[in-house]
Image (cartoon, rainbow, N blue to C red):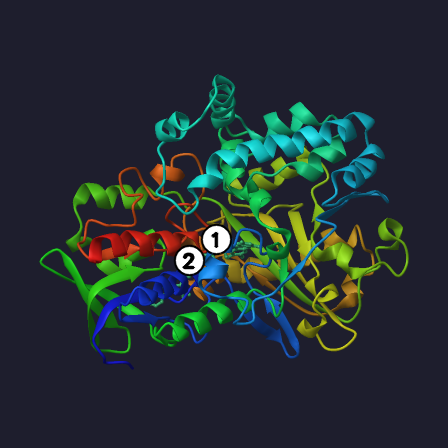
Amino acid sequence: MSSGSYDAIVVGGGHNGLVCASYLAKAGLRVLVLERREILGGACVTEELFPGFRFSACSYYCHLLQSKVIDDLELRRHGFHVYHIDPQKCSLFPGDRALVVWDDVERSQEAIARFSKHDAAAYPNWVRFWERAAGLIYPYFLRPAPTLAELAAGLRTADDQAFLDALVGASMEDVVTEFFEDEAVRGAFIQAHDAGDPAAPGSAWVYAYIKCNTFTPPENIGIVKGGMGGITAAMAAAARSFGVTVETNAAIAGILVEHGAAVGVRLSGGGEIRSRLVVSNADPKRTFLTLVGEQHLPAGFLRRVRRLKTNTAYFKFHAALNRLPDLSRYLGSDYDARYLGYARISPSIGYFKRSWEDAKHGRPPRAPVMDIQIPSGYDPTMAPSGKHIMSIWALYAPVHLAEGTWEERREGVGEQMIDTLAQYAPDFPECIADWQLFTPQDIEARVGLTDGNIRHLDIVPGQFLATRPMPGWAHYRTPINGLYLCGAGTHPGGEVTGAPGHNAAQAILAEFR
Ligand SMILES: Cc1cc2nc3c(=O)[nH]c(=O)nc-3n(C[C@H](O)[C@H](O)[C@H](O)COP(=O)(O)OP(=O)(O)OC[C@H]3O[C@@H](n4cnc5c(N)ncnc54)[C@H](O)[C@@H]3O)c2cc1C
């Protein structure tokens, strides 16, 4: 274990920890990153889950990684490469209908017209709506988080102000049903992410965060060469090139606090390392409730930390495939596996809502919404020759089960996902060589995410922009002097963006210099 003297210790080698460490080291600080797992990357990793089959074990779709971070860290020089996916998305419906959405708006309209001419005509307006909504937020990705009032003050016209006013309270269901009339088209476009319920007021506002991918250049959207671990491998190489010391198998048991200031860390394996400041890449609840310890924090602050929302969770299913499933009734025989760069099962808004209702009441959904990826169509190196891998991000998972334990339920939930997909591809069970299901509990154990929360905290109104992680604390500082947050629980939020790491480094450097 390193024993040199450091200006900054970064707790956790997730992608934001690596980004933050890189910027600090570039500015001349001596930086040590300590990661508890044997591999770096947190929720942005590639792992060989079955012999010869490598998977993006958690995140699997690169769409918000910031170009500035890619350039500043010279990630391409360190091997980062994305296979752009087009079609963007292929939604499958019971029967034989598929809706394929392309980068090209007119080509997408032709596909939508097979469902509804009205909806095909509305599609360009839908695209423009989200460009406008995301355009409100995107300028702040790499800047301090604005309050709503500050955001509104930056708008030029009364029309923009009216748009913001309407968006902030709108639900995804409001927006989708405003544009589209066909049940299947509505199902293909409905989303709710951490809001869960697509009817929840504000669910459209926070979805605009995800739609900031509208501004990501095509060469950075898609499937990462070598899996998502290709991103963090490049980041780790960049960090080391800037002089960062990076250690794995180095779990931190606690952050040392003396006289109200962070002065280093205590290692789980024993021993302490001192530093002038500490930056936590762990989520806010874990950072404050476990690593800092309640005795060092004001009671009011602690109460607010305990109330932070981690109420929305997801499953991740991985399968090693001996062959591609038969989807000929949708895509023709000998279909191109690249159609399954992002496939979706969400046949209607009602189906989506039932999945959320089940999870909300502690039940694994009887019919989960599934976002399916077969990346080996783009990157055959992920599987043995002629074979494939499939990963499914399944919505929604109960954070806490109403009945039983995950040990008792895991296999049944996985089998139910296989059965659900078999309704669309009947030979799917025979294609599977092996499979694994990650429950929220598994994700927590693997990555250290409280409640398995994939974005550290739900991205919901109240934990967004100047209120992320909580009002008054959106500036990466904490009540402990010299302790900062740099992970997905801070502005602008979760997903693989590099933005919290970038922003935290700027905040630290502004104070440290
Ligand atoms: C199942 C799943 C699917 C997802 N899908 C996508 C997707 O397709 N696209 C996308 O953009 N995003 C996706 N996300 C979200 C995205 O991956 C995360 O929001 C993002 O990776 C978080 O990065 P981070 O660096 O802030 O934190 P993390 O990745 O959580 O990293 C934190 C690190 O800190 C370490 N750590 C914690 N405690 C300690 C300790 N005590 N000592 C030492 N180290 C510690 C952890 O081991 C971890 O490596 C997904 C996430 C999950 C879990």
Residue at (54% x, 68% y) in the render: 229
Pick the front one: 39 or 77: 77
**In x, y percent, where is residue 510?**
25, 52
Cβ(mark 2) to ligand 1 < 8 Å? yes
Q: Residue 449 bears which disc, if any?
A: 2
Residue at (78% x, 66% y) in the render: 431
Pick the front one: 485 or 193: 485
Q: Quick check: marks 2 and 1 in contact, CB under 8 Å? A: yes
Within-10-Å neighbours for mark 2: few <14, some 14–19, many 20+: many
Cβ(mark 1) to ligand 1 < 8 Å? yes
Q: Residue 500 bears which disc, if any?
A: none
* Numbered marks: total: 2
Task: Return the residue at label 1.
Answer: 454
| Image height of 408 relative to 241, above or below | above
User: Extreme right residue here?
Assistant: 333
Pick the front one: 25 or 294: 25
**In x, y percent, where is residue 484?**
27, 55
Badge 1 element: loop
Residue at (50% x, 60% y) in the render: 70
**In x, y percent, where is residue 25?**
32, 67
| Image height of 132 relative to 104, above or below | above
Image check: 136 left or right of 219? left
Residue at (50% x, 71% y) in the render: 233
**In x, y percent, where is residue 8?**
25, 66
Closer to the chain start, of discs 2 and 1, is 2
